[in-house]
Image (tube, helix red, strand yellow):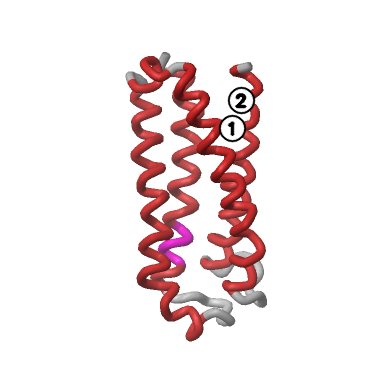
Amino acid sequence: MFPIVETVHVLAITMLAGTIAILDLRLLGVLFRGERVTTVARQVLPIVWTGFGILVISGSMLFAAEAAKSYANPAFRLKLILLLLAGLNPVIYYRIVYKRITEWDTSPKTPFAARLAGATSLTLWTAIIAAGRATAYFN
């Protein structure tokens, strides 16, 4: 059963990280420059949240199967810290930057704070994936 849950977990991270990357790249002005940020967000966020839900369930199952081993793993601990930071990034974005989205929603070049949020998100999700993969090397 473990390999099946692990496969679901990997597919869910692909689902979440791939779709959140689309929004992040729009914030950076790399993709969909002619589209409103709100339009891109409205299209990808349901997929992001679905992937997140699957990740929480599959990740909890994986952790429950090897809790002591996972907790002692430095790569796993790093992954948890990075997940916390990745969760804080959109909170900060929505509380500060998104409040003024009507002013910049259609602009191909978003404000610096929006670009910073997108770059931070891409960096954190890349690091989370790397840390998750690194857990296999610290057994």
Q: Which residue is mark 2?
A: 5
Q: Secondary structure at mark 1?
A: helix
- Which residue carries the number 1 mark? 9
Q: In the rendered image of this protein, does residue 127 appear above or below residue 108? A: above
Residue 114: percent from left, percent from top: 44, 69
Q: CA distance from mark 1 to mark 2?
A: 6 Å
Taking 62 as reference, is 102 above or below it? below
Question: Magenta stretch: dominant SS?
Answer: helix
Query: In the picture, which quadrant includes the C terminus?
Result: top left
| Residue 31 among magenta residues | no
Provide residue 127's location: percent of width, then percent of height. 45, 40
Q: Is residue 77 left or right of residue 61?
A: left
The quadrant the N terminus occupies is: top right
> Within the image, what quadrant is residue 76 found in?
top left
Q: Amino acid at mark 2?
A: Val
Residue 115 position in % (x across, y down): 46, 67
Q: Residues in magenta?
A: 115-119
Asked whether the residues under the numbered discs 1 and 2 touch, taking CB atoms below 8 Å apart as contact, a structural biologist would say: yes
Question: Is residue 19 toward the left or the right of residue 27 in the image?
Answer: right
Residue at the image position 41 percent from the left and 51 percent from the top: 87
What kind of residue is marked 1? His
